[in-house]
Amino acid sequence: MSYQPRSEDRFTFGLWTVGNIGRDPFGGPVRGPISPVEIVHLLAEVGAWGVNFHDNDLVPIDATPAERDRIVADFKKALSDTGLVVPMATTNLFTDAAFKDGAFTSNDPKVRAYAMQKTLNSIDLGVELGAKVYVFWGGREGTETDSSKSPLDSGKRFREALNFFCEYAVDQGYDLKFALEPKPNEPRSDIYLPTVGAMLGFIATLDHPEMVGVNPEVAHEHMAGLNFTHAVAQAWDAGKLFHIDLNDQLFGRYDQDFRFGSVMLKQAFYLVKFLEDVGYSGSRHFDAHAYRTEDYEGVKNFARGCMRTYLILREKAAQFNADPEIQALLAEINTDDGSHHYLSGGYSREKVAQLKAETFDRTALGARGLPYEQLDQLTVEVLLGVR
């Protein structure tokens, strides 16, 4: 199999991903900047379906209105020439010094107002370019010291901002959903709403919870040592998996944003299997960066590698699902003689009476072996290509 990406795979990259110039806290850039138009053509060359952006990835923060219009026109032409689409947009509320203490949660009301203005303009731009999902990553919505901010007040400020944006989208007639992206730390010591579960709880408090979901990222949950597939499953079960960021990350490290599947292959397999098994149809967005060692040919290899690994793991997931020995083990593990089907379908007094009257052999229950070692080994063998 060639593992060539197709449009129906819905693979996307951000302008900030393949356009990353290789700067890090200890070293300057190793690649020269390339324009948004050049990035669109690069992504078309490697077979991507779409491109996403922060407002200032496309239009510099200090651009004049005339410069803005010219840049957007050139970008639209590049999209038309290549056939790439823009499924998602977001706002940079973390780079500029004005946001050093957050945007929507800043203690300064003028900063909060500027952040809202910037976001409204960015929403307009995203919709103009076709985006159906708008992501909020609270990069600096947090603290280094809890002496500085009330987490209760910060939560209220964030809620008010999101309620405002939802009402704006409704008033403008935009076909737009919002997705909140959690992260535990970096660049702040502690970022508010650090996990998918925290975001889901917060969404339930909004005025328009139906308009707001989550954009979970592999690296962000792995930074906290959490199981990303479990978080994605929770979001899916809640009907809130509006977007997803794919990359790779060792547990407990700084935000590495490695090529998808490059360091934790087994975890990547379970994620791909889950997305394919449940029929996730949204964008598969690679929010990752090429190694700092690479030139732009290496960046192309990085982008191709993200997509190729996903497609290989999708094939492995299908192989897992079709493997007779694996499926026999799963059937054995999940054996059900039907004697407790009466407990499904909700509560009743009759069910309580029947359940309380039952006698269970807890010794036998505890003695039953579960062949998880064998199942896991077979999974590893599928991944290693020996089955």
Image (cartoon, rainbow, N blue to C red):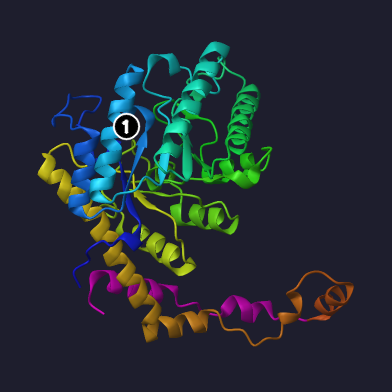
Asked whether 224 or 320 is in front, the reply is: 320
**Residue that label 1 marks:** 72
Question: In this rendering, does residue 193 appear at all?
Answer: yes
Task: Give the residue type that dot 1 points to.
Answer: Val
Q: Is residue 356 magenta?
A: no
Q: Is residue 385 magenta?
A: yes
At a point 62% along the width and 20% down the height, the residue shown is 150
At a point 29% along the width and 49% down the height, the residue shown is 84
Number of callouts in the render? 1
Q: Main secondary structure of the magenta part?
A: helix
Q: Is residue 39 above or below residue 148?
A: below
Q: Horizontally, is 226 left or right of 285 in the view?
A: right
The quadrant in which residue 139 appears is: top left
- Position of residue 281 measured from the top left corner of the image (x, y, whole percent): 44, 60
Residue range of the region highlighted in magenta in the rendering: 359-387
- Position of residue 213 measured from the top left corner of the image (x, y, whole percent): 55, 46
Q: Horizontally, is 22 left or right of 104 in the view?
A: left
At a point 44% along the width and 85% down the height, the residue shown is 328
Asked whether 272 or 361 is in front, the reply is: 272
Asked whether 358 or 217 is in front, the reply is: 217
Asked whether 228 or 277 is in front, the reply is: 277
Q: Quadrant of the N terminus?
A: bottom left
Q: Quadrant of the C terminus?
A: bottom left
Q: Horizontally, is 38 left or right of 144 in the view?
A: left
- Position of residue 142 measured from the top left corner of the image (x, y, whole percent): 50, 25
At a point 40% along the width and 30% down the height, the residue shown is 186
Question: In this rendering, does residue 103 appear at all?
Answer: no
- Position of residue 19 measured from the top left corner of the image (x, y, whole percent): 23, 36
